[in-house]
Image (cartoon, helix red, strand yellow):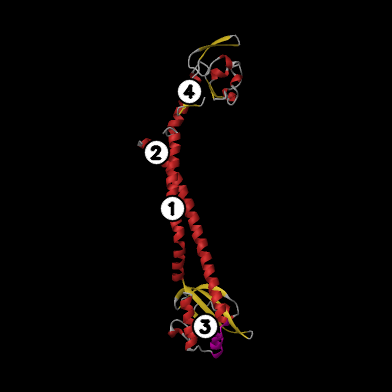
């Protein structure tokens, strides 16, 4: 294909691929955002569910009542962390002092982040804050004993760990994005090639010039010229043809009208042969000739 011919194909390809990529990336971004929000919501609900179970455990309530966690309670908290892939399980009293923590040095120190206050007031909640282990997704569940709050169970997953889990869950989306983009690009190139082929490999400026040249030739031709489709409906005429029956209307008014609007007896002539024929109308003699309009070896008019 010549450089001149590539111009239209290139622009069509650019338009199609740009639209495709913009649409796909927008959908992908919104899907990833929605997926991330749903994932964080599910993880938050999981933290609350685990925290509720811990809040009912006798070892937790006993540690809070004694204001001290023994080794068995700390081991139990570590087991829960390991079983549920949590980064920390902290039992804290009503002053926000930790009774358990993955790092023994942090035990008996105040919980960091400030988001524990809501739980200390008796409300379950999920938040994202930075503590001694870094930024994490945290779930807080109050612990009650005989209707009175005696402490809080806090559970968390580091944001980095959460991002790893989210990334793993999104691998399938990325694969689908890649496959969809490749298929879309191939489809875009095929569609643009088909459109270019339908335009007979002409550029828009060339098509416009040919159309203007054709109209000029028709208008300057003194002989009547009529173009019809296979149903003998007028598709194009020139000024000379519009005056066949002395009509005082423009040629555009005849577009879409039957051939009989201009030629009273079309059955007297053979439209399927190229030879010249004699035709008479309104006392006027005409030398009539017809030629088929062929597009891709198919007759269309």
Report how far apart the C-alphas of labels 3 and 4 lie in the structure: 92 Å
Q: Which residue is mark 1?
A: 179
- The secondary structure type at the circle numbered 3 is strand
Q: Where's residue 153, x and y in %?
A: 54, 80
Q: Which residue is mark 4?
A: 216
- The secondary structure type at the circle numbered 4 is helix
Taken as a whole, is the magenta stretch helix, strand or loop? helix
Q: Nearer the viewer, mark 2 or mark 3?
A: 3
Which residues make up the magenta segment? Answer: 56-66
Q: Which residue is mark 3?
A: 91
Report how far apart the C-alphas of labels 4 and 1 lie in the structure: 51 Å
Q: Nearer the viewer, mark 2 or mark 4?
A: 2
| Disc 2 and disc 3 in contact, CB within 8 angstroms | no
Neighbor class of circle 4 (other Cα within 10 Å; few <14, some 14-19, many 20+) is few
The numbered mark, 2 or 4, whose residue comes first in the sequence reads: 2
Q: Residue 7: give its label.
A: 2
């Amino acid at each position: 294909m010549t450089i001149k011919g590539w111009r239209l194909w290139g622009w069509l390809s650019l338009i199609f691929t740009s639209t495709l990529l913009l649409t796909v990336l927008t959908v992908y971004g919104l899907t990833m955002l929605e997926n991330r929000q749903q994932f964080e919501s599910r993880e938050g609900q999981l933290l609350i569910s685990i925290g509720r179970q811990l809040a009912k455990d006798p070892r937790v309530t006993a540690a809070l009542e004694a204001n001290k966690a023994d080794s068995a309670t700390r081991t139990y908290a570590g087991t829960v962390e390991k079983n549920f892939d949590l980064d920390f399980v902290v039992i804290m009293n009503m002053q926000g002092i930790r009774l358990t923590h993955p790092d023994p040095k942090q035990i008996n120190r105040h919980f960091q982040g400030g988001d524990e206050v809501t739980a200390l007031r008796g409300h379950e909640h999920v938040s994202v804050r930075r503590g001694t282990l870094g930024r994490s997704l945290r779930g807080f569940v109050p612990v009650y004993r005989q209707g009175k709050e005696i402490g809080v169970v806090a559970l968390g997953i580091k944001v980095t760990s959460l991002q790893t889990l989210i990334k793993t869950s999104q691998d399938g989306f990325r694969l689908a994005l890649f496959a969809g983009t490749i298929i879309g690009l191939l489809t875009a190139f095929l569609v643009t090639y088909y459109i270019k082929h339908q335009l007979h490999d002409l550029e828009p400026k060339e098509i416009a010039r040919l159309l203007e040249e054709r109209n000029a030739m028709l208008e300057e031709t003194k002989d009547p010229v009529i173009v019809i489709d296979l149903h003998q409906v007028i598709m194009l005429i020139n000024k000379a043809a519009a005056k066949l029956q002395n009509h005082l209307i423009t040629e555009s008014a005849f577009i879409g009208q039957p051939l009989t609007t201009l030629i009273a007896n079309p059955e007297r002539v053979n439209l399927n042969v190229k030879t010249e024929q004699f035709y008479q109308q309104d006392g006027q003699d005409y030398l009539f000739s017809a030629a088929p309009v062929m597009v891709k070896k198919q007759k269309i008019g």
